[in-house]
Image (cartoon, helix red, strand yellow):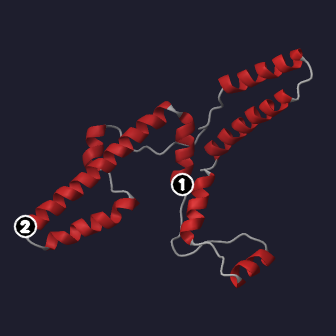
Amino acid sequence: ALLPATRCKLWLDNAQEITTNLATADTKQTQFERLQKLDDVLQNRPLLFRGEKPLTRTSSSAMAQITVRVSGADKLDSRNNRQDLNTNFGTQLAAMLNQADVERQWGMLQYSESQRERSNELRAALNYYTQQLEFDGDRYLLTASKEDRKRMIRNDQLPTLTAVITSDLDLR
């Protein structure tokens, strides 16, 4: 799951290193050669997906509107809509329409993102990495040193699970 994103990072690191070395060029000829090298690196993007297959979202916007599962963010709304089906007819109808709209909007979002991924391999690589992430809602592994862990526990400074997930996604 990390290979496309890693290839992207290595490519960008290479371009950044050339850019850094550009500032230290002592002659115009050296500077020109480094600019040519940077241009070559940026013009020839690496193949990010080599054997890995990006996850397909949906193939058409019409099918996306009626067949895509609901996102994790909308699960609570979905559950509430389904619970409302046990009440009177008006509430049932409103809950069904609301649920259908949630699923339609989610499908349309998935379709538009799949179109963006088809046109931008970098976006596809980073989204592929994000889609492979799995979080356990009950625990996480703290990789700090033993002394830091002790200090954090004593001072009640352990990060919350939400902070850990947010931090990981922010690194992306």
Q: Furthest-right residue in view?
A: 26
x and y percent of residue 51 in the render?
Answer: 59, 40
Alpha carbon of mark 1 to alpha carbon of mark 2: how far? 41 Å
Q: Nearer the viewer, residue 59 or 84?
A: 84
Foreground mark, 1 or 2? 2
**Which residue is labeled 2 in the image?**
89
Q: Amino acid at mark 1?
A: Gln
Q: Please tell me whether residue 156 is drawn above or below residue 83 in the rendered image.
A: below
Helix, strand or loop at mark 1: helix
State if disc 2 and disc 1 touch (CB < 8 Å): no
Identity of the residue drawn at 18% across and 70% down: 84
Q: Residues within 10 Å of mark 1 (few under 14, many from 20)?
A: few
Locate residue 132, reporting x and y percent.
Answer: 54, 54
Q: Which residue corresponds to the image point at 75% horizontal and 79% vertical from the top-left?
A: 151
Q: Quadrant of residue 47?
A: top right
Q: How many marks?
A: 2
Residue 132 numbered mark, or none: 1
Q: Nearer the viewer, residue 167 or 70?
A: 167
Residue 50 position by quadrant: top right
Mark sitting earlier along the chain (1/2) = 2
Q: Is residue 54 left or right of residue 75?
A: right
Q: Amino acid at mark 2?
A: Phe
Residue at the bottom extreme of this rendering = 154
Residues 70 and 159: in front is: 159
Residue 105 falls left or right of residue 127 = left
